Image: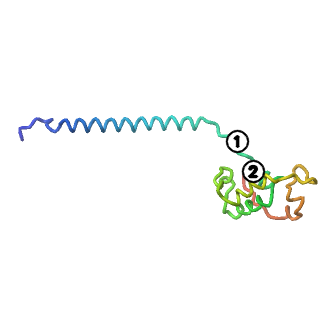
Amino acid sequence: MSGLPEDAWLTAEVIDAERELDAAIDEVYASLREAQSIFAEIEATPVPARPDYHDFLEGRKHTPEWDAVVRRIESGELTKEALEAGEYADDPGVRAAYASLADYTEPEDAEPDTPAEAVHDATYFERPRVIDETGW
């Protein structure tokens, strides 16, 4: 035995380091509690209804620019879910499709549920469309 007391290692520096470690752990737990609170708020918040893109992709407001977006969705380059989530906000083709709505006017001879393009394009209903379980 060395003759030193058992707690000789417990110096002022060790005590300070222990306090700093305890404070850091307390901060981590406080952050964790805050994150859990935020997650609980998010989980309790109702999910807003998703916009109905049917009019743009298949319906009356279907413009040639939206037709290009539909082809990209059908090819797998884009997805409807990502489009609806706004993930393509910087995509030039998607931006052009949205911009085309500013100039959109209902054709005079269009029936209320007839896509505008169908009035001008007799092959509209002959083209294959991809429809999944959501009806798109």
* Observer able to see residue 59: no
As drawn, 131 above or below 4:
below
Q: CA distance from mark 2 to mark 1?
A: 12 Å
Task: Say if 21 sits above or below 53 in the image.
Answer: above
**Farthest-out residue, front:** 103
Residue 88 placement (x, y as % from top left):
65, 55
Q: On the rendered structure, is 113 left or right of 130?
A: right
Tell me which amino acid carries mark 2: Tyr
- Left/right of residue 28 with respect to residue 62 in the rendered view: left
Q: Residue at x 37, y 35 (%)?
A: 26
The disc placed on residue 53 is 2
Q: Whole-percent x and y of residue 63?
A: 80, 58
Residue hosting label 1: 49
Q: Quadrant of residue 76?
A: bottom right
Q: Residue 95: horizontal and vertical position, in percent?
A: 70, 56
Relative height, residue 113 to residue 24 (above, below): below
**102 over 77 or under it: above or below:** above
Q: Is residue 106 visible?
A: yes
**Frontmost residue, 94 versus 14:** 94
Label 1, residues with CA under 10 Å away: few <14, some 14-19, many ≥20? few
Residue drawn at x 38%, y 36% is 27
Colour option used: rainbow
